[in-house]
Image: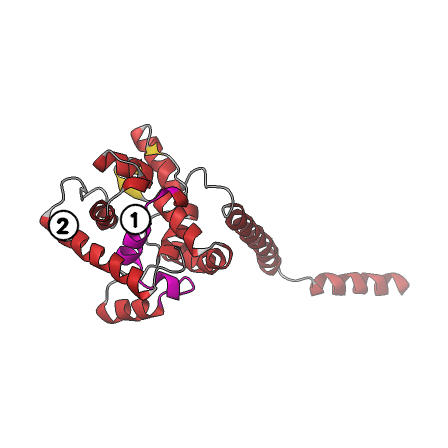
């Protein structure tokens, strides 16, 4: 009788085990959660690290090195970049840079209303994309960008964000950063850029492989003129105070 009771207990215990599929789901969820936390911790550590150490490379630069064999790139400290270059890129890409926490909600609403994504991406978002992520427009990349941007805004100063941006942005095929761009187009250094030269460099950023700062098209020239006016406007009205 005791033996039968023991067998019944074991059979009952076996019957209470969750199905194989449930166990697999639990196992996958457990490891996905741990991996997710690990990735989040690694990104946080890199954001903190890149506040004091310059990113050695990005996925975009690595891709171009593999494609072209080499790229032209040399890091330049923000103090060695003409202030008008900082104002020009802000005027061109993110006029409310000093007034938002990583997302320009007004620009996002306008982009939704017009059905265009151009102008909705802030410099902070672009830096996160360029430093940590890849260039396609997938929802995964957008989700990661949205998650990391507030972290970057919380840890990096606005001036540091501009320093990162101007040193990893692509200005021509295989030309990365303001140092290489200033020499490539004007045979000068970043600290010697004139307002017109800075505006031309900012004007080609949306399409660096299709526009030329040294031999600008009519569109690029008009765009540069507008950027020059915008750079002066944000200097006067205080929208450059957070990085100057």
Q: Are marks 2 and 1 in contact (CB under 8 Å)?
A: no
Residue 205 drawn at (x, y percent): 26, 48
The answer to whether residue 91 is visible is yes
Q: Is residue 190 above or below residue 33?
A: above
Quarter in which the N terminus is drawn: bottom right
Q: Which residue is mark 2?
A: 221
Identify the image quadrant of residue 105. bottom left
Q: Residues within 10 Å of mark 2 (few under 14, many from 20)?
A: some
Q: CA distance from mark 2 to mark 1?
A: 16 Å
Most foreground residue, 69 or 218: 218
- Write down the region rendered in magenta: 80-104
First along the sequence among labels 2 and 1: 1
Q: Which residue is mark 1?
A: 85
Residue 135 drawn at (x, y percent): 34, 48
Residue at 32% across, 67% down: 108
**Residue 103 magenta:** yes
Q: What is the residue that sits farthest to the top in this orientation? A: 69
């Amino acid at each position: 009788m005791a033996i039968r009771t023991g067998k019944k207990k074991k059979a009952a215990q076996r019957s209470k085990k969750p199905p194989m599929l449930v166990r697999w789901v639990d196992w996958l969820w457990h490891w996905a959660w741990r991996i997710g936390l690990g990735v989040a911790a690694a990104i946080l550590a890199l954001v903190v690290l890149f506040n004091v150490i310059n990113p050695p490379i990005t996925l975009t630069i690595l891709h171009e090195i593999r494609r072209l064999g080499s790229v032209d790139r040399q890091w330049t400290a923000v103090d060695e970049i003409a202030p008008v270059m900082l104002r020009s890129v802000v005027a061109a890409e993110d006029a409310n840079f000093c007034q938002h926490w990583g997302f320009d909600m007004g620009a996002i609403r306008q982009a939704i209303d017009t059905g265009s994504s151009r102008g909705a991406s802030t410099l902070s978002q672009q830096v996160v994309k360029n430093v940590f992520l890849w260039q396609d427009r997938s929802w995964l990349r957008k989700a990661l960008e949205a998650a990391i941007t507030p972290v970057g805004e919380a840890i990096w100063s606005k001036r540091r964000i501009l320093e990162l941006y101007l040193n990893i942005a692509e200005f021509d095929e295989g030309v990365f950063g303001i140092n290489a761009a200033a020499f490539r187009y004007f045979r000068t250094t970043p600290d010697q850029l004139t307002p017109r030269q800075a505006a031309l460099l900012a004007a080609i950023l949306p399409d660096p492989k299709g526009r030329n700062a040294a031999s600008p098209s009519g569109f690029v020239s008009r765009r540069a003129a507008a950027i020059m006016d915008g750079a002066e406007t944000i200097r006067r009205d205080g929208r450059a105070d957070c990085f100057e």
